[in-house]
Image: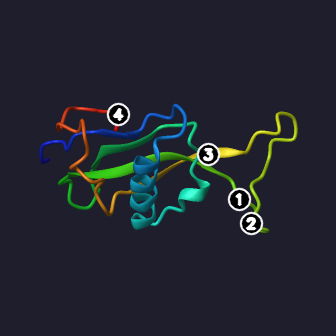
Amino acid sequence: MSPAPTALTVHDGYGMPDDDQRLRICTWLTANGINPNNVTQHAPIHILPIPVRPPETGDGWLAQVIVFTECYVNADGHREQNLISREPVTFQRTVPLRVPFPANLPGNDGGEEEAV
């Protein structure tokens, strides 16, 4: 198995990022096939390495995935709400990373895990 790529926190989940960072995140999510309008700002967005080991070969590798929280959108295109709390219904998604997050960001020095 190859060495693990580093984990990265794209958004820490605490409030709205500034306008430039928000645009960068939305553009990156869209490039990865994720609708940024359905991603909640109240939960973190991470890029994580995960081991993949197909049973047929036994050889493994590391794949990177994006882990984020998405609002559930019904067939009518509206966000579902919890009937008691009136908060949006959310669920955690994990999708393969297709486009890496831009590395040339202020404060991104390639550390183990970092809030951007």
Per the image, label 4 sits on a secondary structure element best described as loop
Q: What amino acid type is highlighted by mark number 1?
A: Val
Which residue in the rendered view is the most extreme toward the left? 2
Residue lying at 40% horizontally and 63% vertically, measured from the top left: 32
- Whichever of callouts 1 and 4 sits on the residue coming sooner in the sequence is 1
Residue lying at 61% horizontally and 55% vertically, measured from the top left: 38
Residue lying at 20% horizontally and 44% vertically, measured from the top left: 5
- Distance from the alpha carbon under mark 1 to that under mark 4: 28 Å
Residue at mark 1: 73
Residue lying at 42% horizontally and 52% vertically, measured from the top left: 25
Residue at mark 4: 115
Q: Is residue 111 above or below residue 67?
A: above
- Distance from the alpha carbon under mark 4 to that under mark 2: 32 Å
Q: What amino acid type is highlighted by mark number 3?
A: Phe
- Whichever of callouts 3 and 2 sits on the residue coming sooner in the sequence is 2
Residue at mark 3: 91
Q: Are marks 1 and 2 in contact (CB under 8 Å)?
A: yes
- Distance from the alpha carbon under mark 3 to that under mark 4: 22 Å
Per the image, label 3 sits on a secondary structure element best described as strand
How packed mark 4 is, by other alpha carbons closer than 10 Å (few <14, some 14-19, many 20 or more), is some
Residue at mark 2: 77
